[in-house]
Amino acid sequence: MMRQFELVERVKSYDPNADEDAINRAYVFAMKMHGSQKRASGDPYFSHPIEVAGILTKYRLDSSSIITALLHDTIEDTPATLEDIDKLFGSEIARLVDGVTKLSRIEMQSDHAKQAENLRKLVIAMSEDIRVLLVKLADRVHNMRTLHYIQKPEKRRRIALETMEIYAPLAERIGMQEIKMELEDLAFTELHGEARSSIIARLNFLREQGGDLIGRILEELRKTLEEAGVEATVSGREKTPYSIWLKMQRKNVGFEQLSDIMAFRVAVPSIEDCYRALGVIHSKYPMVPNRFKDYISTPKPNGYRSLHTGVFGPERHRIEVQIRTHEMHEVSELGVAAHWKYKSAGNSNQKVTDGRQYRWLRELLDILEHASNPDEFLEHTKLEMFQDQVFCFSPKGDLIALPSGATPVDFAYAVHSDVGDTCVGAKINGRIMPLRSRLQNGDQVEIITSKAQTPSPTWERFVVTGKARARIRRFVRTQQRAQYVDLGRAILVRAFRQEGYEFTEKGAEGVIKFFKAPTVDDLVAMVGEGSLTGKDVVAQVYPELKTAQRPDTNVVALAKGKPPVPAKDRANAVPIKGLIPGMAVHFAGCCHPLPGDRIVGIVTTGKGVTVHTIDCDNLEQYANTPERWLDISWEAGESSVHVGRVDLVVNNEPGALGAITTLIAKNMGNIINLKITNRTTEFFEMILDIEVRDVKHLTNIIAALRATPAINSVERARN
């Protein structure tokens, strides 16, 4: 364990103006607060914050970050309070410690939603001060180094998976390559230990076979550059086991088929020397096609700058060469932490603490604003962090970095949310191209907009950025809610009139608590989306009618605080011939059988009997198990309510939805669910679930719908 004076000396070695007294006080305070606490390894708990602080000194972070590292677990695990930290060390340290503490409080939860909430809080905290993330990354590095001391395998695996999915990509995003590689390797050891051992064994074998191959290649590269008059420092290394394994997975190849497992770095004094060195290497060794990347003229979003090229180098080995200046190399290793090293002594307050300067972080904040729940935020954030990138240009020459596979719609949302919302077309390199076109490196993209345009639900099928997907989903949710409210209101008006009453907002207000609806509009929307029927609401507003209503499990479920049961899944007494008395029965959602259809029963494990129509396509999967088939039929005179499903293509014009609901109501049908599957400027495609008596009843409704001018086509759904 690092001693107090050693930590201070480390910090003073790169920051002579560091607050030595505050570091000493933080060291003593943390040691006193943690007292006799132990870690899983049996070491004193205080060794952990010391190691975290030591990791940060390697990246030459400021005194505030080091003090935060020492104190980051005191609020959570000791009697110390945030007020104590503020009083002893000031508001800046208190704010940083509070930011790290808020993350740790729910980090160890195994629930998926809690993991999403953890990431949400991390994004908010680091948007205020990026040092919160730096301390958190150092904390995760030390925890991963000691992961093997945790006894429960499932807990080790969960922590390793979270590290691989969240913390390693975040380290890469802020350019901290060394931390990213260590986190990946430590997580890889836990998640795929056998694969890692196999790759290491293979690398050892190749070293034995090739002798000092890396040394020989290094020497030849040095000699080649020296003879050309290029002053350079050349270093080499094997790629990490995880990067090798990842390439094997992506390309679906074996280890023996990988040829570029060695990477060499050429460091030179200036940018001009980078391109000179590139020219020397390309003139001496054949270049591997499509392997050259210039990250100097177009840096990565995290500030990384370098030239990358693949060549058939010395001894005809395929190698990767990275060429950069010494300063670029520091930034590539230290990432955002390099800014503390390069800040001028005369401008000591110029610290990179404002995370909002990072475009990718602004994108995550935008996703956070528009995601409907933590799980959706987690999904979109992983989309934003994990994918490789392409670089495109706006007509003004601005560089936009997007995930690989991005489309003009993704580009439009990256420019601005309003541009994405109103996008109607795109020009790629001067040519009008479909919005689902995949963008390539170097494409110039011009977005065509219209104030009359709104996001199309179909865009979600091809966009790849989390921001675009979050915006589209939010619009669709808003649009669907408005339609559910309109439809629900029409259903309620009809339901109340059938009982001789008028539907009023005041009457509905009296029952919204019973149905767990925040507002009347929420209650109406629940009816529109099929979670409730109009009869449910009427029966609650006028209790004297309850005895006349058939029992509804939704009313009971909502009263008990449980989610409503879709109408198609409600239990009914189903008079069907050929069933064993007491056997559980439910109707297949693929074909929606109705009285009047020829039907067959399939015995399903855990569900009883599933009733299908005799012409249902899904019956093919049971062709080889005739013992599961039951010969059944409808009882004569069966009159309970059933659900029929229809597919409609409706003209996109005012009043179309109202015409549908009115017509179905006139034909004594009850809409219990509506789903819009596609929307264009001309048509809506939708699915309707309708309560009917039998197949004849549904056929009459379909015939009436076909005669309606607002409807383009209607068919009974078979899926």
Image (cartoon, rainbow, N blue to C red):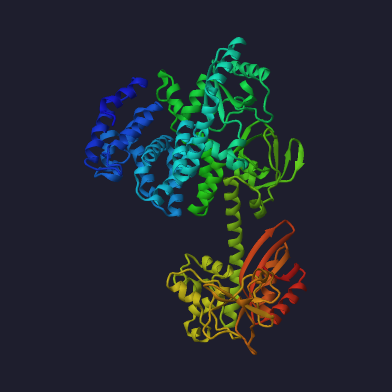
Looking at the image, residue 597 lies above or below residue 686: below
* Residue 64 makes an appearance in the image: no
* Residue 375 makes an appearance in the image: yes
Residue 292 picture location, percent across and down: 65, 27
Looking at the image, residue 608 lies above or below residue 17: below
> Which residue is outermost to the bottom?
637
Residue 2 picture location, percent across and down: 29, 29
Q: Quadrant of residue 309?
A: top right
| Residue that appears at 45% across and 54% down | 113
Seen in the image, is 50 located left or right of residue 697? left
- In this view of the protein, which residue sits in the foreground, 561 or 308? 308
Q: On the rendered image, what quadrant is the C terminus found in?
A: bottom right
Residue 58 picture location, percent across and down: 39, 27
Q: How many marks?
A: 0
| Residue that appears at 53% across and 81% down | 583
Residue 469 picture location, percent across and down: 59, 49
Q: In which quarter of the image is residue 321?
A: top right
Seen in the image, is 341 located left or right of residue 602? left
Seen in the image, is 262 located left or right of residue 66? right
Seen in the image, is 599 located left or right of residue 301? right
Q: On the rendered image, what quadrant is the N terminus found in?
A: top left
- In this view of the protein, which residue sits in the foreground, 334 or 454? 334
| Residue that appears at 49% across and 65% down | 519
> Which residue is outermost to the front?
209
Looking at the image, residue 371 lies above or below residue 199: below
